[in-house]
Image: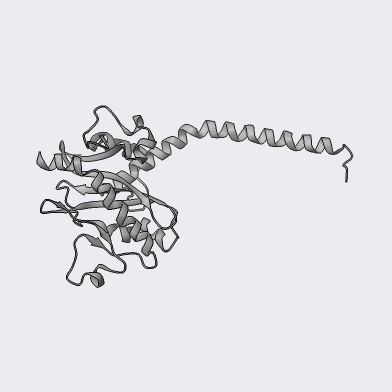
């Protein structure tokens, strides 16, 4: 049925509204781009600190300020970019200078150090890989000995809430602290077991953590990508152990 002003008027009006909305959205996206990039960068830094075991929330559960995050990074955190082939540091590069595609392809390997009184006391690496439904992203920190896990955080994923999504919960991540990944001059394979460590290894096991009930494939994925990513950094870690 035609309108009093004709179908052409209706179509023209709809196009004008859509064009106006598009322009508003584009302008908003452009205006907020810098803020969005800053928030992404702040989230990255917060998760690096969390992996290192730094308290990113106070006793009231409030997140530490951006200024505090920047201060800690300026005073205690150093970022190193490694060549994926040789494991050698590339002088003068930071993650801001590196193509994310090269990081995803492991051609460039970001590494973070945590320093106390000018001495490196912990190392952290980004970890990521397939879970059941999604790619899981996180950071894993090692103590100065490069043999025991200092902490881990999984901050981005699309796993099922209440099942694989438990990777983001403290109860799961806290299990990793103190676990061994290097002993007697060799890499010790890390493992997220199906069920509990006590059931799987009654004699005990210091390089395995309890799995998530109902999320066997998520745990298998975490096991695979943690071991793969640790192996990628071994060339550099061997240099540190020898020094």
Q: What quarter of the picture does the C terminus occupy?
A: top left
Residue 86 lies, in percent from the top left, at: 22, 36
Tell me if residue 165 comes above or below residue 106 in the rendering. Answer: below
Residue sitting nearer the eye, 243 or 27? 243
Residue sitting nearer the eye, 15 or 87? 87
The way the protein has been coloured in the rendering is one colour
Residue 101 lies, in percent from the top left, at: 39, 37
Q: Is residue 103 left or right of residue 7?
A: left
Whether residue 152 appears in this view of the structure is no
Residue 241 lies, in percent from the top left, at: 12, 43
Q: State the image quarter where residue 158 is shown.
A: bottom left
**What residue appears at the point 66 percent right and 36 percent down from the top-left corner?**
21
Q: State the image quarter where residue 64 is shown.
A: top left
Q: Is residue 91 left or right of residue 39?
A: left
Whether residue 34 appears in this view of the structure is yes
**What residue appears at the point 17 percent right and 47 percent down from the top-left corner?**
146
Q: Is residue 242 left or right of residue 42?
A: left
Q: Which residue reaches farthest front? A: 85
Residue 138 lies, in percent from the top left, at: 34, 49
**What residue appears at the point 14 percent right and 40 percent down from the top-left corner?**
240
**What residue appears at the point 44 percent right and 35 percent down from the top-left corner?**
37
Residue sitting nearer the eye, 209 or 35? 209
Residue sitting nearer the eye, 55 or 51? 51
């Amino acid at each position: 049925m035609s309108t009093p002003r004709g179908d052409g008027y209706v179509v023209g009006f709809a196009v004008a509204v859509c064009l106006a909305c598009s322009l508003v959205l584009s302008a908003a996206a452009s205006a907020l781009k810098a803020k969005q990039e800053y928030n992404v960068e702040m989230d990255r830094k917060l998760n690096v600190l969390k992996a290192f075991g730094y308290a990113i929330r106070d006793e009231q559960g409030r997140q530490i300020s951006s200024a505090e995050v920047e201060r800690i990074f300026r005073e205690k955190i150093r970022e190193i970019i490694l060549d994926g082939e040789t494991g050698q540091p590339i002088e003068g590069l930071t993650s801001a200078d590196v193509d994310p595609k090269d990081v995803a392809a492991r051609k460039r390997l970001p590494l973070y150090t945590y320093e106390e009184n000018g001495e490196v006391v912990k190392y952290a690496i980004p970890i990521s890989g397939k879970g059941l439904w999604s790619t899981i992203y996180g950071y894993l920190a090692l103590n100065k000995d490069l043999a025991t896990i200092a902490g881990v955080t999984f901050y981005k994923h699309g796993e099922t809430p209440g099942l694989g999504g438990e990777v983001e919960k403290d109860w799961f991540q806290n299990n990793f602290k103190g676990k061994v990944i290097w002993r007697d001059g060799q890499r010790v394979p890390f493992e997220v077991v199906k069920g509990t460590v006590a059931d799987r290894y009654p004699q005990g096991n210091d390089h395995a953590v309890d799995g998530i009930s109902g999320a066997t494939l998520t745990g298998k994925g975490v096991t695979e990508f943690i071991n793969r990513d640790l192996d990628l950094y071994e060339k550099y870690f061997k240099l540190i152990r020898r020094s």
